[in-house]
Amino acid sequence: MNSPHENKVYDLEERTAKYAERVRNFCLKLPKNQANNEYVPQLIRAGSSPGANYIEANESIGDKDFKMKIKTCRREAKESAYWLRLSITDNSAAMETERAALRQEAKEFVLIFTAILKKRGDS
């Protein structure tokens, strides 16, 4: 039987994975132009990084390693919100709604990762 901690770990791993998938799908729908040619690779990297680093944090070899990975998760979540802001959409309501939802999710990740660090005695 899983402990509550294990379920929470899995839930955040799943949530960050779904975020990465949503970012990828959003990027695939963006118009092709010179600006997006620069922004999209950055956004895909930053959008998938919190999940990958969170998995690494959960496999960390010590508290210092864990905290460093969580700080990376937080930094990359902030960065993905930045690239979402800069990306050029087709201005459709659907794309703007998805951009806003993704930016909100990134902001929530920042709060979650900050809370994890505070619980561990770091911020």
Image (cartoon, rainbow, N blue to C red):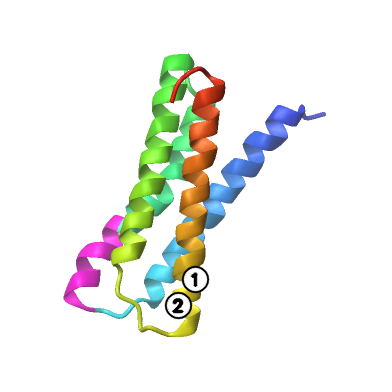
Of residues 41 and 81, the one nearer the viewer is 81
Quick check: marks 1 and 2 in contact, CB under 8 Å?
Answer: yes
**Residue 41 lies in the magenta-colored region:** yes
* Kind of residue at badge 1: Glu
Is residue 59 found left or right of 75 in the rendered image?
right
Of residues 120 and 32, the one nearer the viewer is 120
Q: Residue at x 42, y 16 (%)?
A: 64
The image quarter containing residue 5 is top right
Residue placed farthest to the right in the image?
Answer: 1
Q: Is residue 2 above or below residue 101?
A: above
Q: Residue at x 40, y 53 (%)?
A: 47
| Residue 50 seen | yes
Location of residue 71 in the rendering, given as x and y in whole percent from the top left corner:
40, 31
Q: Which residues, given as a range, are shown in magenta?
A: 33-42
Secondary structure found at label 2: helix
Count neighbours of disc 1 (C-alpha within 10 A) and say few if under 14, some if 14 to 19, many if 20 or more. Answer: some
Which SS type dominates the magenta stretch? helix
Location of residue 112 in the rendering, given as x and y in whole percent from the top left corner:
54, 39
Which residue is under mark 1?
Answer: 98
Label number found at residue 116: none
Q: Residue at x 40, y 77 (%)?
A: 29
Which residue is under mark 2?
Answer: 95
Q: How many marks?
A: 2
| Residue 59 seen | no
